[in-house]
Amino acid sequence: MTPNIKDILERFARGEISLERAARQVNLISYREVGKMAKLDPNRIDRIGIPEAILAEGKSSSDLVEIALSFLEASKAVLITRVSSEKLAALRDVPFPEGTCLRWEERAKAAVITNGPCPKYSGGKVGILSAGTADIPVAEEARVTAELLGCETVSEYDVGVAGIHRLFPSLEKMMDADALVVAAGREGTLPAVVAGLIEAPVVGLPVSTGYGAGGRGEAALLSMLQSCSVMVVVNIDAGFVAGAFAAKIANLAAKGRNM
């Protein structure tokens, strides 16, 4: 039987479990219901170091607003991805509590809503590269995510292998990064090249650019999965996942440096 919060607190009061274990167990069972449509997980960032994000696609504007307000009340910071112009207008019309800030990241098509202090800088650093300009929106989603998780980011775009000489000055700016996100569509070569040149872990981010056979990011994904270079690969257009994973690496690295 799954314990409830009262059971956990009683066990802690009796000295059967430590404070740290009690906190972990509370995080495992805690969620916040929004009507009959959503069960939010605001404690996810405390449990695994990565917050839950709200995907705007597939939601009505009214449902998105209700979910965002509930999430903001529980966590004080909300990341909403894949935001259309219609849903952005709905968010901008919301009478948020005093002190709330809605920041629109146009290239990432993401909204960041905060009510309180900005996320504390972790000391981690994430580099963001894109092969072409068409890959920038997905790369930007990764950047916004990493920054929300407290990382410093440095971005360099349009450095694909068709003109590989453009890459090397950009890599020089990222030699001290703890992790890199490398976004590429079409044949998806850039992440493997970068992973063969730099010590930091590389997250390959395939993008749904390209056309014809292997289009929509499929060739890029398969190319990255078949890479001889050692790297991890996320799904097509998964900018949030790539940014969050890189930030988790960077934050752990920063924590190790500060011990």
Image: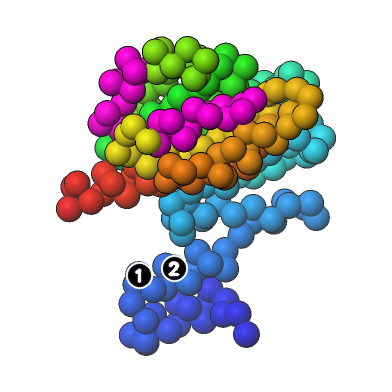
Q: Quadrant of the N terminus?
A: bottom right
Q: Quadrant of residue 172?
A: top left
Secondary structure category for the residue under label 1:
helix
Q: In terms of depth relative to the viewer, which is nearer, 26 or 148?
A: 148
Q: Is disc 1 in contact with disc 2, using a CB cutoff of under 8 Å?
A: yes
* Lateral position of residue 32 relative to residue 64, left or right: left
Which residues are drawn in magenta?
A: 168-195
* For residue 227, above or below residue 259: above
The residue indicated by pointer 1 is 20
Horizontal and vertical percent position of residue 30: 57, 63
Label 1 Cα neighbours within 10 Å, binned few <14 / some 14-19 / many ≥20? few
The residue indicated by pointer 2 is 24
* For residue 68, above or below residue 99: below
> Which dot marks residue 106?
none
CA distance for labels 1 and 2: 6 Å
Residue at x 43%, y 31% (from the top left corner): 193
Total marks shown come to: 2
Horizontal and vertical percent position of residue 39: 69, 55
